[in-house]
């Protein structure tokens, strides 16, 4: 019996493969007669197949394309390309929003079609649409009435070793820094922490090209204050702008100032010198103060002197272990909920 051709093509960014795999597992449970082709999955490609030929042939035969996007992946050209090819082949295009990306930020061709968000109502609608347009039955309907699984938020305990944490990924915090001001000899690797700079004149950035694509809703860092604190996070917004969040002990008001115009100031509460402390900035609480929705965290700047052991970029504080959060100082925009 010949292999059934895929009925649903799923286009997504490679770095969101874990989310997509969980979504496919869920859809396959309620739609067992539907074949799903995941564009980055080795299971969907035949051994020895030329990948573009295989994808092109699949797009020519599918009934539905799920274009899965988030704040991090909305600008990925391959998703837009695959979506456009599929629409040209008369497939139904359904944009699936994986997080809280505003509908208004969808670009062509995605903005031409009704999009779905992965909440309880949206997921049920997605299952109904796939069933209707593929002529297949819905199985295990009771699952649709149960609380939806967490596709994008999986609470875990992070190991306590020093590092830069982007979601569940850990990067070596001792490498990848570049001096942009002052003396490069003032950057020193100590046991379990970094000693960065001897004065404000010494500035270092990580990574050099602001190339991170890190979750953004909560920014946290573990520091030992010796003098004033100057910590910057570079944001990547959906309009292409890259403002900086400036967390410092020298400022006492929230917001942008006239000089420099791209720095949004976040005042630190008074923290003692000489002991380790975790600072958490609730970026979600201040997003409305920016001109464009936040897409990701792209990098960091630190002015000396500062002792630093950890940086976290997470969408859920459950990604940070309790040993760090128990005594953390959480900074949220005044009046936010």
Image (cartoon, grey):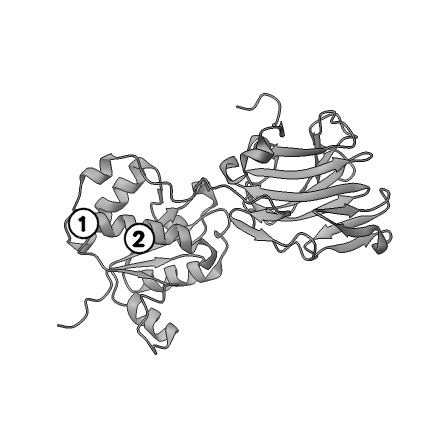
**Residue that appears at 32% across and 66% down:** 43
| Local secondary structure at mark 2 | helix
Nearer to us of marks 2 and 1 is 2
Decide if residue 36 is in sight here. Answer: yes
Task: Return the disc, 2 or 1, that comes first in the chain's sequence.
Answer: 2
Measuring from the top left, give residue 132's x and y in whole percent: 18, 49
Q: Residues within 10 Å of mark 2 (few under 14, many from 20)?
A: some
Residue 136: % across, % down: 15, 53
On residue 329, the disc is none
Spatial separation of the CA atoms under disc 2 and disc 1: 18 Å
Location of residue 224 by image quarter: top right
The x and y percentages for residue 170 are 57, 51
Q: Position of residue 171 (x, y in %)?
A: 60, 53
Task: Please tell me which residue is depicted at 64% across the width and 44% down the height of the picture.
Answer: 311
Q: Which residue is mark 1?
A: 132
Kind of element beneath mark 1: helix
């Amino acid at each position: 019996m010949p292999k059934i051709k895929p009925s649903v093509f799923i286009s997504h960014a490679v770095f969101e493969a874990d989310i997509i795999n969980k979504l496919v597992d869920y859809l396959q449970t309620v739609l067992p007669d539907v074949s799903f082709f995941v564009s980055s999955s080795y299971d969907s490609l035949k051994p020895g197949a030329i990948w573009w030929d295989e994808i092109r042939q699949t797009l020519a035969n599918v009934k539905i394309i799920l274009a899965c996007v988030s704040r991090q992946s909305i600008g990925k050209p391959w998703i837009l390309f695959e979506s456009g090819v599929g629409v040209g082949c008369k497939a139904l295009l359904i944009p699936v929003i994986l997080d809280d990306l505003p509908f208004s930020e969808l670009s062509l061709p995605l903005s031409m079609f009704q999009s779905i968000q992965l909440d309880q109502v949206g997921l049920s609608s997605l299952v109904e649409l796939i069933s209707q347009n593929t002529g297949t039955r819905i199985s295990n309907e009771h699952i649709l009435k149960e609380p939806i699984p967490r596709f994008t938020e999986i609470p875990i305990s992070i190991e306590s070793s020093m590092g830069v944490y982007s979601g569940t990924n850990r990067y070596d915090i001792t490498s990848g820094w570049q001096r942009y001001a002052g003396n490069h000899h003032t950057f020193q690797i100590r046991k379990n922490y970094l000693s960065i700079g001897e004065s404000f004149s010494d500035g270092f950035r990580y990574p050099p090209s602001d190339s991170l694509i890190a979750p953004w809703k909560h920014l946290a860092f573990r520091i030992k204050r010796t003098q004033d604190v100057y910590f910057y996070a570079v944001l990547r917004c959906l309009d292409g702008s890259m403002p900086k969040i400036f967390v410092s002990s020298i400022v006492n008001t929230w917001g942008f100032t006239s000089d420099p115009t791209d720095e949004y100031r976040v005042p630190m509460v008074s923290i003692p010198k000489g002991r380790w402390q975790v600072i958490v900035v609730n970026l979600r609480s201040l997003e409305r103060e920016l001109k464009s929705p936040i897409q990701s965290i792209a990098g960091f700047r630190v002015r000396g002197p500062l002792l630093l052991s950890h940086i976290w970029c997470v969408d859920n504080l459950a990604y940070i272990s309790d040993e760090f959060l128990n005594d953390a100082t959480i900074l949220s925009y005044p009046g936010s909920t």
